[in-house]
Image: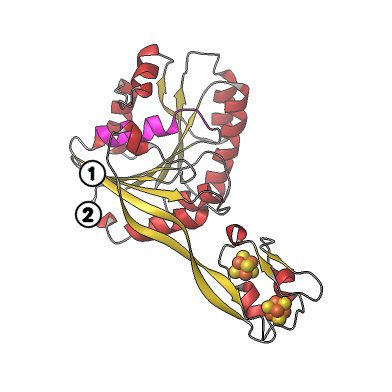
Amino acid sequence: MRIAITGGKGGTGKSTVATALAMELAKRKKVLLLDLDVDCPDDNIILSINTKKVKNVETMIPKFDKNKCIKCGRCSQVCRENAIVCVMGKPPFLVPEQCTGCKACQIACPVGAISEEKQTIGKILSGKKGNMTLVSGEMKPGIEESSLIVNAVKKYVKEKEKHYDYIIIDTAAGTHCPVIAALLDVDLGIAVTEPTPLGNHDLALILELMKKLNVKSRVLLNRSNIATKKEIEKTIRRFKTKIVAEIPYSKKIQKAYSKGIPIKHKAIKKIARELKCRL
Ligand code: SF4
Ligand code: SF4
């Protein structure tokens, strides 16, 4: 079963919940935890797991043959990422960090002046703790398109997934491309939020996204005692979902988090129990 721990807003405790749930499930079952917050993966720190690089993530970038190029500018016109700069009378100039390797420029070039080169855009790391295997994607600084790393991690684990009872996916915050890539094909998405106006606003966005992707959604209310949850409940009714668990604000949890100790809370145990009935 694939379960994504997600959330429209950053800083709501998504990674804390993902790692705690993975630890709880790994007491009895085999768990594969994917850290797909590839801009700043930190599940290895929370879980104190030493990860090692298992693979580089590479994409194609165009290589221009200056002798063949007729300086028509067509490659720059078709590049949706604005990765090619063409100045009149000069050969094209590439900004590699912007390139997603889509090959549109290569197809569009009328004289076959574009061949392929590889660039490393990130890496995949892995480590183990008991019944749990952690696989993290990490994007190289300066690279723009993080969904390429998310897709590379998903491809890397595809054949390995069958050896695990649960796949827990810790997504990035927000509703942009890497989150969409992480949410595709999951059986359940648990949105972690908090009862604040911004938390409620971003909860509506992530629930809307999961509805569009046809992903069953549930909500975990973190720091549930810091404000009234009336507005959150309205949003939950609007999207016909429900709160699966609440974790109140507690100094003990904050201290454990700051020391890199996965949290232990009855709400996490409740979710782990209910996952057997698919919530
Ligand atoms: S491969 Fe795609 S993104 Fe990269 S430069 Fe060519 S058109 Fe732009
Ligand atoms: S499309 Fe081909 S020929 Fe035209 S500027 Fe680009 S590389 Fe040169």
Name the spot of residue 172 as percent of width and height, x first: 49, 41
Q: Quadrant of residue 46?
A: top left
On residue 128, the disc is: 1
Name the spot of residue 28 as percent of width and height, x first: 17, 37
| Amino acid type of the residue tagged 1 in the rendering | Lys
Q: Is residue 34 magenta?
A: no
| Amino acid type of the residue tagged 2 in the rendering | His
Question: Colour scheme of this structure image?
Answer: secondary structure
Mark 1 touches mark 2? (CB < 8 Å): no
Spatial CA span between label 1 and label 2: 14 Å
Q: Which type of secondary structure does the marked residue at label 2 adopt? A: helix
* Range drawn in magenta: 10-24
| Image quarter where ligand 1 lies | bottom right
Q: Which residue is mark 2?
A: 163
Q: Residue at x 41, y 43 (%)?
A: 188
Judge depth for marks 1 and 2 and give the one in front: 1
Q: Which type of secondary structure does the marked residue at label 1 adopt? A: strand
